[in-house]
Amino acid sequence: MTTLPPVSVIVPARDAESTLSEALESILGQDYEAGFEIIVADGSDGGATRALVRARFPTVHLVANLDRSIPSGLNRALEAARHPVIARCDARATLPPGYLTRAVGTLRRTGAVNVGGRVRPTGSTFFERAVALATSAPIGAGDARYRVGGPEGPVDTVFPGVFRRSALEAVGGWDESLPRNEDYELNWRLRENGGTVWFDPGLAVSYRPRGSLAALARQYFDYGRWKRAVLARHPRSWRLRQLAPPVLLGALAASAALAAAGIAVLVFAPAASTTGTTLLYAAAACPLGYALLLVLGAAAIGLRRRRPEAGLVPLAAATVHLAWAAGFFAGPPRGPAGG
């Protein structure tokens, strides 16, 4: 049996003391025969995360991430890494037992440059569990395999990724001008450089969702605005599912305009009340249809999984859709990171 190569596990962290311990414990619990090192790139505003690592995880290497963004942290950790395989783990994620062995085995078996699987959102509060249900179902997440699962094979992107170091270095690592969507954009460049990104359904990494509606909206607003930057940079990376949220928000805006027009007709031109009423009926079609779709989707999830949190799925899914679309229309901010 061929010996597997040693692995460097890299973890970008910023003020992550509430979740990082669980992530590091899941990595240290791996039984990977060839050995591995862990590198945390700390971009925190204070010293709590660094103190936590030093006190509880003395074998973990710490590197400074002065720019504080996720891609810069990943690149600083990559520079410090010693091994030919690089496994990414987020500070809010936990790796299942046997993850490294299976991932590196799949990397070798397939010849891919990046191997990963499905994100498995796992919440600790009622709201987080509702977000987990919404973002792991087609109604909230679309048809991406890393979100909803599917057969093994080549894909656009995976979560979170186990890479051949040589392939990462060949494309220049993560793009530090992208605070979000850096993973998708990196996988696009890896594929453009002739590599294969491989989805293995046997790999599933737990991830803790945001704990409030405001935090969830900010997260997906940022996803949308930086997805626009990625699509502008790589136009051929467009996928049909990415049109759905902007089209939805546009349709809802049009519905609001029709409703305003209908109300104006009823108030200022009572003789044309039939026209005003027709406009109001037309305005109601899109929001009511969308709301019905969300309720039916949530009901299906609730019946299938028998989870009371499904009652909040319409709210969580609508927040994901509309925040993403609003960010997409807003686009990246201007400045050093946004252009």
Image (tube, rainbow, N blue to C red):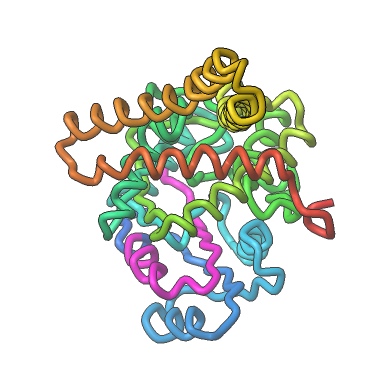
Kindly give the residue lying farthest to the front in the view shown.
271
Residue 2 appears in view: no
- Residue 147 lies, with reference to residue 93, above or below; the image says above
- Residue 35 lies, with reference to residue 112, above or below; the image says below
Q: Which residues are magenta?
A: 1-26
Residue at screen point 70% across, 50% down? 173
- Quadrant of residue 127 within the rendered picture: bottom left
Residue at screen point 48% across, 79% down? 49
- x and y percentages locating residue 305 in the rendered image: 18, 35
- 112 relative position to 143: left or right: right
Residue 84 appears in view: yes
- x and y percentages locating residue 290 in the rendered image: 44, 26
- 288 relative position to 195: left or right: left
Residue at screen point 48% across, 49% down? 5
* Along the viewing direction, whichever of 140 and 284 lies nearer the viewer: 284
- x and y percentages locating residue 288 in the rendered image: 42, 26
* Along the viewing direction, whichever of 11 and 135 lies nearer the viewer: 135
- x and y percentages locating residue 43 in the rendered image: 61, 72
- Quadrant of residue 324 within the rendered picture: top right
